[in-house]
Image: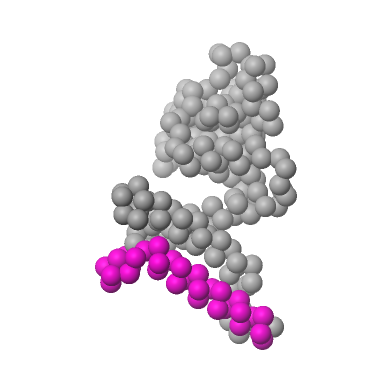
Amino acid sequence: MKILHVENAVDPATRICVLECAPEDPTQVQDVVGRIVRLGPGLVGKIERVGDWDDRHGGRRVVVRIADDPVTSMEKTSAEVILGSVPTTSAQDAAARVAICKHGHPMFYALLAEMAELHDRKNHDYAGGVDPLANFKASARMGIDPALAVLIRMMDKWSRLEAFVRQGNFAVKDESVEDTLMDNAVYSLIDIVLRREQKARGNN
């Protein structure tokens, strides 16, 4: 049995994994509850429960609780109950580091998970292709650098916040102050991603 896919959950202390198994036999993975999973460098967890079948990845979804002390968890567990890890990306390594952070405000880490979900939902609607930032990069067709285009979007959001400070309310009620701040937080990270991609291509 192996891990086919790993994704963040609403609870930053858990991960959703997809385990390889036969779709017609949901009991095949029931005995994995309580077993240790190695998700990536420095990221170890224990399977809490088994969920539904995942058509997209072709396996059974399970909820994994991240271990507070990955090293101790590995030392106390025999190699036979460790499930094989999936190849990790630098982004997954970063998620692993966030998962074991303990000194910041818990709500901060919860908001990071919300940002990831917001980014995922909007990319599903706006990008919908191979490149998750295709909608931002489209500005290049008009001669506007994508990283600069993101900053312009951020300026629009800040203008909205400035208007709120002056007037004390928003005329359009479907976007709150928190929504606007969250959008700008996501935009900030997207701008960093675009700039790092440009740098990797040798385009500074």
Identify the colour scheme used. Answer: one colour
Residue 140 in sight from this viewpoint: yes
113 vs 150: above or below: above
Q: Residue at x 59, y 38 (%)?
A: 97
Q: Which image quarter holds the C terminus?
A: bottom left
Relative depth, front residue between 181 and 188:
188
Q: Position of residue 136 (x, y in %)?
A: 38, 63
Q: Position of residue 6 (x, y in %)?
A: 50, 37
46 vs 12: above or below: above
Relative depth, front residue between 183 and 188:
188
Apparent side of residue 145 relative to residue 64 in the rendered image (left or right): left
Relative depth, front residue between 203 and 20:
203
Q: Quadrant of residue 73?
A: top right
Instruction: Read off the magenta span.
Output: 138-167
Q: Residue at x 58, y 31 (%)?
A: 43
Q: Quadrant of residue 12?
A: top right
Q: Main secondary structure of the magenta part?
A: helix
In reply to whether residue 125 is colored magenta, the answer given is: no
Q: Position of residue 153 (x, y in %)?
A: 46, 71
Q: Residue at x 57, y 37 (%)?
A: 96
